[in-house]
Image (spheres, rainbow, N blue to C red):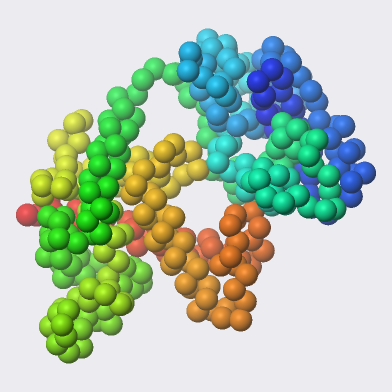
Amino acid sequence: MKNLYVLDLGQNSATLANRGINKEMTPDELELAKSEVSNLTIEEVLDIPDMLPFGSYLVAEDAHVGAPRSKFSLAQQFEEEKLLRFYALCKERGITLLLFSQKLTPRALYFSHPAFAKRASWADKDDKVEVKDVKSDTIDPMAIHNLLTNKPELVATLKKPVLSFKEDPRKVEGWDFKQETNLILNHERNAKYEGTIIRSHLDEMLDSIVSEIPRKESLEIFCLTDENKYKQDSKYGKKGDWKVKTDAPKYGAMTSILGMLMDGDGDLRTREETGLLPGLAFAEEFLFGMTAFHTRGGLARSNLVHHFMRSFIRGKWKEENPDNLDFTKKSNRGLFTPEEDAHFKKYRRKWRRALIDMFQAMKRILERE
């Protein structure tokens, strides 16, 4: 990207980077890169739109520039009035302001220069580069710059500043709905997803779910095929029953979705605004937490992303690359090779499609009951 600038704010100062760093740099090249980062006072940040060329892109961490300061703030430097004036000045000067999720900063560091990511993750330092005296406010914006330059498709995922900081009733309802979902799923998890009203209802729904989802691949991801039924009578079930042990359907993942639509007493969960079951858009924004801008993603997201998705994607890699298991051991996407990243994106799309199919199938079934 041309004319890309990345801003990072500290407690009393700020840095502005117009270039990136990468892992191929020598110590001397790193020193030169650091020297080209502009150091600003907090007050000077508000004048940045006047400093940049018309048509520039200015990227800043959402935690610093996406929300106004309050008495409980730690990361925010500016009050609401100053932020809105800053947004307006950017627009007036032809500057495209975009907000970068702080949750992606570790990925940017790993992708750009793992030595600094190790510092950020409290891991061992890289012997080739001395990082202990380097401020993250200097390195982080250059790492983000490098990631966006090399993966321009990420620009479309960045957040745009809001027009107003007034409380959004939909977001308040979404937050409350997520909190209630956490309580429901905590109960299910403590019961090990067995013997509850929700699990009983799920068992009764399984055959209907299979009929509602025409996509074979989605059924395979949730282990809802004939291979997941008993071939003969056993102590766990009769021939034709769904398995409950090895090769069983993904009960935990399905319960996490059903818990968005039904409470622990078996009653349907309707939205305050509509009086209806939550729709897919509402669930994706507040319950699935599928973007890097989610805050406190909740138990549903933890179950579906950190456990279900990761296990599925790593399992597919093992099937296709049995002699190369390095991918399955990597802790951050910034460390992926191009081949590994392509695999990740391919199967994440399939997993996401399966989640949508399951959510919509369950919703249709419950609406008919």
- Which residue is painted at 31% across and 59% down in the image? 253
Q: Position of residue 310 (x, y in %)?
A: 46, 61
Q: As displayed, is residue 219 above or below residue 291?
A: below
Q: How many marks?
A: 0
Q: As displayed, is residue 354 above or below residue 176?
A: below
- Residue sitting at the far left: 369
Q: As displayed, is residue 319 above or below residue 219?
A: below
- Which residue is painted at 80% across and 26% down in the image? 38
Q: Classify residue 242 as left or right of residue 31.
A: left
Q: As displayed, is residue 221 above or below residue 159?
A: below
Q: Position of residue 280 (x, y in %)?
A: 30, 47
- Which residue is painted at 72% across and 51% down in the image? 124
- Which residue is painted at 44% across and 36% down in the image? 295
Visible residue check, residue 2: no
> Which image quarter: residue 45?
top right
Visible residue check, residue 166: yes
